[in-house]
Image: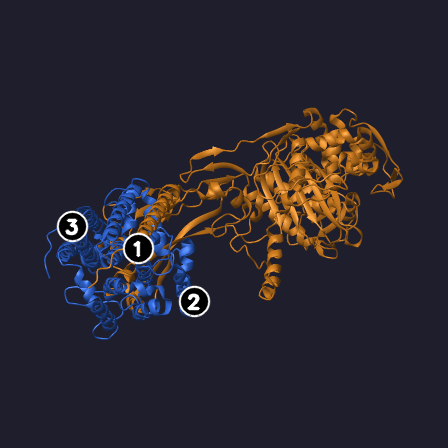
Chain colours: A blue, B orange
Amino acid sequence: MKLKSKPFDTTLFITILMLAGLGIIMVLSASSHLGKISYGSPYFFFKRQIIWVAGGIFVMLILSRISYKIYKKLGIFIFIAAIICLILVLVPGVGRGEIRGAKRWIDLGFMDFQPSEFAKLAVIIFLSSSLSVNHKRLAKFWSGLVPYFCMIAIVLALLYKEPHYSAMVLIVIISFILIFVAGAKIWHFILCAVPLGIGAAALIIMEPYRLQRIFGYLHPFDDVTGDGWQIVQSLYAIGTGGIFGLGLGQSRQKYLYLPDAHNDFILSIWAEEMGLIGMILIVALFIVFIWRGLKIATKAPDLFSSILATGLTMLVAIQVIFNIGIITNCLPVTGMPVPFLSYGGTSMLLFMGASGILLNISRDIEKL
Amino acid sequence: MAKESVKIKTKHRIIFLLVISCLALIALIFKTAWIQIVDSDWLQKKAYESQTRDRTISSKRGTIYSSDNTILAKSYSVETVKVIPAQVTNQAEMATKLSEILELDYQEVYDKLGEKVSEVTIKDNVDKEKTDLIRQWILDTKSKGIKIDESVKRFYPNNNLASHVIGFYGTDKGLYGIEKSYDDVLTGTPGRIISETDGRGNNIPFSSESYYAAQDGRDLVLSIDSSIQYFAEKYLEKAVVDNKCNKGGVAIVMKPTTGDVLAMAVKPDFDLNTPFGPYNDEQEEIWDTITSEEKRNIRESMWRNNAISDTYEPGSTFKVITASAAIDSGKFTTDSKMVCTGSITIAGSTMKCWRYYRPHGTQTFTEALMNSCNPAFISVGLAIGKETLRKYIDAFGFTEKTGIDLPGEASGVFHAIQAMRDTEVATTAFGQRFNITPIELVTAISAVANDGKLMKPRIVKEIRDAEGNTISEIKPEVVRQVISKEAAETVKTMMERVVDKGTGGNAYIKGYRIGGKTGTGEQGIGASTWYVASFVGVAPIEKPEVVVLVALFDPKGDSHGGGAIAAPVVKNILADTLSYLQINPYIDPNDPGKTTISVPNVRGMDLEEAIKTLKNVGLSYSTQGKGNKVADQIPKANIEVIANSKIILYTEEGVEKLKVTVPSVVGQSPNNAAEILKNVGLNINADGLGVADSQEPAAGTQVDKGSIVNVKFRIKEVD
């Protein structure tokens, strides 16, 4: 392991710091009432978020100094580790058991660890590593693509057991993106769409409450007190914000109306307090992030780092797109935190870590 | 390890991802902008509704008073003390306090507080003073679990009185009558307390609370006088029962100078406190077995205010209108001559006079009204012509609603003027083949009584606030001058003759000048024909104070004639009302037949002195016994008798009184009856006109000689 001294992409770095900084402010505002009611302190979540951000930046800086090349060798082991974690989370006594209807957490003592978040990163690293070696075989459907599908299916099956559907959706999309970027044939994707569609239909038929979620999403005001509650409260928040917002800290929806106000719906509160202007700012920062990330991917020194940078950047991009899509009622509600902004340790460490790797790749690029 | 170079294809695909991602994010910004700009207003409004707790402070519904300040409808609040046992933390303390304030047994309350139910009622109908004490205690001790619910009840202290006028109140609004037409005024504006709360309903710290005080409903003062309403209902009820009126009856008393409805009685009626029935024992028995559809029909017909919502054929009462048109247009005078031959043929159809068997012959216009002679009125109608007749019908307001402040008013239905041939003109002139509402007729007759000025009927006189201050007064409203003052005077005198000497004699009251007109209308055809017997009276005719209309629907008793069965009801209502209004009777000394003499006390007098005393007041005498001092007299002192009645004077103490058997005078004329009684040594006290209808004591009874027999006379013929 050798430390690199070449500079990384400062634009990307500053963008990340700005996002994380704004995230701390958002968490403070959105969580103060809940913190006071539930834990006796309006700063309960705020203090923890500061620790996560600080820890995240630390991890990012460390990883930005560790050569990305090691992941190419470690790819398969990271993937296996992630699968083990995903199994452990289901084991009684190891996993924290069911919380809000899902088994997603392992108590590490200092934090609740979500293997499914780690799995996202693991899949990206593994695919980048493997695809960069095997990209020539991708032209063949059965020997090139299907083995990947099978390995990803293992992850999906474990996530389905938790269940953690948003992570499943995300991993499917990311996997396809990486295979696509690695050079697979377009018509192979079309071929895949058929079984996927059948699979999705099967999932809905097996557990009809998902269908309700979808109906609630199309007509949230039909069931304001039930399935539509969260999205309606989100729309109240965003709509109330208007162009300029109510002002920082002035959100009313954070007063226990909007569940997960400091988490998945943090941007709803932001939109309420800072208005359209605030939303444009946040989206602009993410566009910068995506632009820099994908630019690193195009200029990356080799195929592995290119695919890896694409995966890490698109992980952020997809989560942001999904999140804003959900809070504005364009997509059905699933748990999808906003990278760098939402409260939560695993997510923060994951994205900071991913950014660290991305920054490290940027060090290998002469002219960005 | 071979270094794999990044291919152009990969670069292109990455740029494709960049473009897609940016487009997606920009699209989402547009969606956000749509929510924050286009949808912002209504989302903000809905969000505010959801973020605030809007508590309503109910406004007290106004009280309805009669013009004599009797409460007709009133709201009062009752409070119920309930407890949610699961929330109670201080059971013993709370039981002590509640049992003390609510005057309940401690143990009983204690047990209730421990019950395993979601909610338990401690006491109903609790005064506000007591619940305020409980509220204070809750504040002081921060006790949890007590719930005090307030509800407002509407109460009608007089039950059935004026039920169709007052109407009643449903759960949130007035459903009928004044309660409906003045719902807004009575309701007031509920107040609100709006406070910002969090998602669990707790107040948000440092948030503001907006308070909007409730505006209590206004009180109403009706033109209805509870006493007159009571008179009208009492006599109408009796008439409906006596005459077996299947479809009930209506009585309206109006003050002609203002249009005030002093009474509006509709039978059958219902208790406003239980407006949804069943309405009688018969219905109560079958109530659970009938369908809701049938119940609804029963209710709707019960609630219907026939005085304004239903039309009927007025019959001869309408001749007053024809007469007004004839006099006011100058085409006729009271002395205009007209001939009745018992029937008249118009355009091939023959119309009979009600007394076709004994035609009226040549008569003046006044006599024609007195006699209620159809052929005479047919000729009048044809002479003034359909345009003129119709002009007056319109002017009297029969073709429009009177505009009374009650819901559901109907208006009269007449032949279209183009469709009126001579036959229709003829029938219209004497009041048949068209329909009007009772309120229209009473309003039109009031115009005749009010110097020709048609008034808008007034039922609400005044709107007051809760402190009794007048908020607004509803002034009497002149609709138009229908006929000249002079014409009105003339028609009034004609109406007086109807009661004095004509078909309206049953409405005669000693000492008052009363005008009126009988009427008998027909409804339906063939075997299903039924009658409306009506009478409209005006009193006192020289300065009318009241106009009374009584209409009896489908009488199945002895008679269905207005003069026979409706006029006595008007008479009774008028007698009570005039005396209530302190309009005193005037006794004409030149009208001995209708004058009574109070028998003086001659007991203990010398016989000579007694005879002189009796002669002085216009009484005759006969003595019994040989003494010269009056020991006893029959009739006794102070009894009212007619002039020349014979007083029997007993001049010996302890003498057995002479007894006579009362003969039957039923069916006799007043003169004959007086003669028959006089022949056996009895005195008569006559009431009414026509033939003797009943007597008291009954025939065959043994009474003291000289006693008075009360005989009631009635006119039996119908018009």
- Residue named by callout 2: A198
- Residue named by callout 1: B10
Q: Which residue lies at the image location 79% right of the left edge and 36% below the top edge?
A: B419
B261 in relation to B668, above or below: above
- Left or right: B15 with respect to A17? right
Q: Residues within 10 Å of mark 3 (few under 14, many from 20)?
A: many
B105 in relation to A19, above or below: below
**The residue tagged with tag 3: helix, strand or loop?**
loop
Q: Quadrant of residue A256?
A: bottom left
Residue B646 visible, this angle: no
Depth-wise, is mark 3 or mark 2 nearer the camera? 3
Chain letter of mark 1 equals B
Q: CA distance from mark 3 to mark 2?
A: 45 Å
Looking at the picture, which amino acid does disc 1 mark? Thr
- Residue named by callout 3: A8
Q: Nearer the viewer, residue B436 or A119?
A: A119
Q: Which residue lies at the image location 35% right of the left edge and 58% below the top edge?
A: A333
**The residue tagged with tag 1: helix, strand or loop?**
helix
Image location of residue B473, percent across then percent down? 49, 33
Looking at the picture, which amino acid does disc 2 mark? Ile
- Left or right: B180 with respect to A285? right
Looking at the picture, which amino acid does disc 3 mark? Phe
Residue B95: numbered disc: none
Q: CA distance from mark 2 to mark 1?
A: 30 Å
Depth-wise, is mark 1 or mark 3 nearer the camera? 1
